[in-house]
Image (cartoon, rainbow, N blue to C red):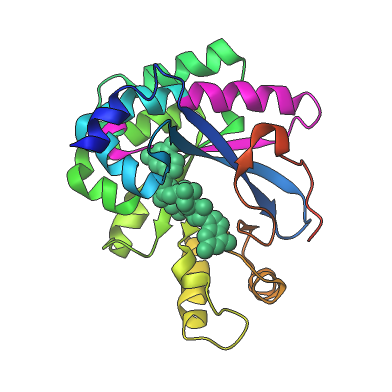
C-alpha cells in the first residue's frame, strides 16, 4: 500500500510536525491549554490528512513511535510556553494501539522526567471506540496513567457505544463532546437536549466537559450558560504550528 510505505519513512525523514489548537476556559475566557495534533507532509503526496494516515499508523504499529515522538515534542514545547504561563496544559491524543503497547506509563513518566513537565500539565485523550477493543487491558493502563498524576480525557464523546455504566468505570476527569453534537446549539437545534444531558451526567460523575467544534459566539454563549467548562474550535483558533500559537484569544 502506497500510504503505508510512505508513512514508514515519515518519522526518520522529518516529515511529521505538530499543530496546536487552543482549549479555552469558558468562564474566564483564558486559554487553559492546547491540543497537539499530528501533521504529515510527504514530499510527493503533500499534506496527508490525519483522518487518512492515523488509521494506517495504528494498523502498522507505526503510531507507537510517531505518538511517542509527538508526546516528547509537545511536552518540550509546552515547557517553553510555561515559562510565561505556568498554568498551561497540553492535550495529547493516544491511539488504542499505544495503550495496548506494554510500557506506555513508563514511557510517559520518562517523557515527563526528561522534559521537566509536571504531570498536572499533561492531558491524555483516548476515544471511547478505541477503549472498547479491549476494555479490561485499557482500564488497567488508564489507571497506571492516572497514578502518574496526568489528566485523562474521553475524546469524541457520544460517537461510540459507551453505556453509562462504562463511563462511570473510566478513570477520566474530562469529557470531550464530539463536534457533531455542538453543531446548532444555541439555535434551538435537536442537539441541545443531548448536550444538556451530557453536561448533567458529567457533572454528576465529577467530570469537566470540553465542547469541540465551537465555531460561533452563539454556540459559545449557550455552552457557557449551560455550565460547559471549556470550548475548543475555530471560533478561538484553528490548529497552527507552534511559532504561530497565541497564548490568548481575541474572542472570549
Ligand atoms: O486535526 P484534525 O482534523 O486534522 O485531526 C483529525 C483526527 O486525527 C482527529 O480525530 C484527531 O484526534 C486525530 N489525531 C490528530 N493527531 C493525532 C495524534 O497525534 N494521535 C492520534 N492517535 N490521533 C491524532
Ligand atoms: O482529536 P479530535 O478528533 O477531536 O480532532 C479534532 C479535529 O477537529 C481536527 O481535525 C480539527 O482540525 C477539527 N476541528 C477543530 N476545531 C474545529 C471546528 O471548529 N470545526 C470543525 N468543523 N472542525 C474542527
Ligand atoms: Mn482529540
Ligand atoms: Na475529538
Residue furthest toward the bottom?
188
234, 146: nearer the viewer: 234
Residue furthest toward the front?
44
169, 249: nearer the viewer: 249
Task: Reply above or below: 23 against 110.
Answer: below
Residue 89 is covered by the magenta coloring: yes
**Position of residue 226 in the picture relative to residue 205 (left or right):** right
29, 205: nearer the viewer: 29
- Residue drawn at x 47%, y 37% is 38
Residue 83: x and y in percent read 78, 23
- Residue drawn at x 45%, y 62% is 178
**Quick check: which quadrant has ligand 1?**
top left
Residue 252: x and y in percent read 78, 61
Residue 97 is covered by the magenta coloring: yes
Task: Reply above or below: 116 against 235.
Answer: above
Residue 150: x and y in percent read 51, 32
Hey, which quadrant is residue 89 in on the image? top right
The N terminus lies in quadrant? top left
- Residue drawn at x 41%, y 23% is 68
The segment highlighted magenta reads: 70-98
Task: Reply above or below: 23 against 99.
Answer: below
Task: Reply above or below: 106 against 190.
Answer: above
Residue 65: x and y in percent read 35, 22
Amino acid at each position: 500500500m502506497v500510504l503505508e510505505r510512505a508513512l514508514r519513512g515519515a518519522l526518520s525523514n522529518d516529515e511529521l510536525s505538530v499543530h496546536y489548537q487552543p482549549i479555552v476556559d469558558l468562564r474566564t475566557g483564558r486559554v487553559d491549554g492546547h491540543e497537539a495534533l499530528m501533521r504529515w507532509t510527504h514530499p510527493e503526496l503533500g499534506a496527508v490528512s490525519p483522518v487518512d494516515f492515523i488509521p494506517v499508523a495504528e494498523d502498522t504499529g507505526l503510531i507507537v513511535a510517531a505518538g511517542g515522538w509527538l508526546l516528547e515534542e509537545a511536552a518540550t514545547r509546552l515547557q517553553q510556553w510555561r515559562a510565561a504561563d505556568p498554568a498551561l496544559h497540553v492535550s495529547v491524543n493516544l491511539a488504542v494501539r499505544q495503550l495496548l503497547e506494554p510500557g506506555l506509563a513508563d514511557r510517559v513518566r520518562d517523557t515527563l522526567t526528561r522534559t521537566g513537565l509536571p504531570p498536572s500539565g499533561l492531558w491524555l485523550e483516548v476515544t471511547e471506540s478505541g477503549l472498547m477493543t479491549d476494555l479490561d487491558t485499557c482500564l488497567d493502563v488508564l489507571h497506571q496513567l492516572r497514578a502518574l498524576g496526568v489528566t485523562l480525557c474521553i475524546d469524541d464523546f457520544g460517537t461510540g457505544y459507551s453505556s453509562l455504566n462504562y463511563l462511570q468505570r473510566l478513570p477520566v476527569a474530562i469529557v470531550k463532546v464530539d463536534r457533531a453534537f455542538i453543531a446548532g446549539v444555541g439555535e434551538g437545534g435537536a442537539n441541545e437536549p443531548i448536550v444538556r444531558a451530557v453536561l448533567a451526567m458529567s457533572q454528576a460523575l465529577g467530570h469537566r466537559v470540553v465542547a469541540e467544534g465551537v465555531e460561533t459566539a452563539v454556540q459559545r454563549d449557550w455552552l457557557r450558560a449551560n455550565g460547559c467548562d471549556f470550548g475548543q474550535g475555530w471560533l478561538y483558533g484553528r490548529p497552527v504550528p507552534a511559532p504561530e500559537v497565541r497564548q490568548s484569544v481575541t474572542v472570549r
